[in-house]
Amino acid sequence: MNLLALALLLAATPAPPTSSAAAAAEARVVEYLKENVKPGRPVVVSELYNSVFTAAEERAALNRLFDTFFKIPLFIAQHQKAAGRPPTLAEISEQFRFEVPGEADVMLRIMESDPRVPVFLKRDPVTGEIERVDVDAILAHPRFGRALERSISGWEGRPAPAIAVTGYDGQAIGQASLAGRPHVLYFWFTGCPPCVRTSPLLVKLQRELAAQGLVVVALNADGYLALGSTDDSRAAYAKQNGLDTLTLAHGTAEAHDAYGGVSVYPTLFFVDRRGVVGRQLVNAQDEATLREAARLAVQ
């Protein structure tokens, strides 16, 4: 089984809980890939499974890495669209929790080595940083194109899909409780660096627009991603960071799927009083962009 085939199989595999043993296993996998990824030669995952990484923690790390395989091109294209520039290797590392030095670079090398992945990047040969992104090449690809089009702005102007989730307080949150209320659906996970920058801005916006009825529903993806956080630790994190003024809820696979398979964090949907998505934003945004999206939702 080759890289692309197994990546499809593992696309729904959640990330393993973070631990020192898991981190060490991922480091071993990354160091091996650094030495063995060759231009024009797809990585054969079955060989890695059968001959190289046979320990359970190593295979879990391998699963996590290849779960990101189809998400990285979408994130890069989304970032290019939103920011007008490619993401840095550091920003890719933040988004996908790549903590091993050189991990983001080796994942890009894996994509570049596989002839079935569209050529959509130009990178600096010395630093490895992305210099140019060909978004059209991704949009034209049968695998990536539809997902990218949907994830960039595919919900804007459409009715917001119904969700049914449970708040941190045990209360049900869904179509009935949100009907007629301008709101933001904020997909995030605990400790996500772009989310850390975004969350305080949403707290501020909700406070400023409370008179107009704006509510931010923060759908935490820890459980969906199997990050290993407990309810107590999540609640403590929210309180410590001032997020307890938001409507905190547990994100579910159904909620993620309802909005096209959210896979990049944060992702935000600004929904007006009619229940229509006015703006869809991916990744960290500046305050002005968030404020304008919120203004459209409450008007």
Image (spheres, grey):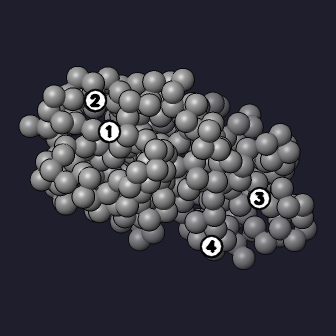
Q: Residue at x 19, y 60 (%)?
A: 159
Percent from the top left, x then y, of residue 16? 71, 53
Query: What residue is rendered at 26% in x and 53% in y?
Result: 177
Q: Do labels 3 and 4 touch, CB within 8 Å?
A: no
Front of the two marks 3 and 4: 3
Cα distance between the residues tagged 1 and 4: 34 Å
Disc 3/disc 2 C-alpha distance (Å): 39 Å
* Amino acid at dot 1: Val
> Residue 296 placed where, x, y %?
14, 38
Look at the image and tell me in which quarter the C terminus lies.
Answer: top left
Q: In the picture shown, does residue 230 fall above or below 287?
A: below
Mark toward the viewer: 1 or 4: 1
Q: Is residue 220 left or right of residue 203?
A: right
Rendered residue at 64%/54% (across/down):
226
Q: Marks 4 and 1: in contact by CB < 8 Å?
A: no
Q: Tell me the element at label 2.
A: helix
Mark 2–mark 4 Cα distance, whole angstroms, equals 40 Å
Q: Give the quadrant of the N terminus.
A: bottom right
Residue 216's mark?
1
Q: Are marks 3 and 2 in contact (CB under 8 Å)?
A: no
User: From this viewpoint, which residue is outermost toward the left?
Assistant: 299
- Which of discs 3 and 2 lies nearer the camera? The answer is 2
Task: Name the side, left or right, on which 45 lies relative to 299.
Answer: right
Depth check: 116 or 147 in front?
147
Residue drawn at 63 percent across, 36 percent down: 233
Q: Which secondary structure, mark 4?
A: helix
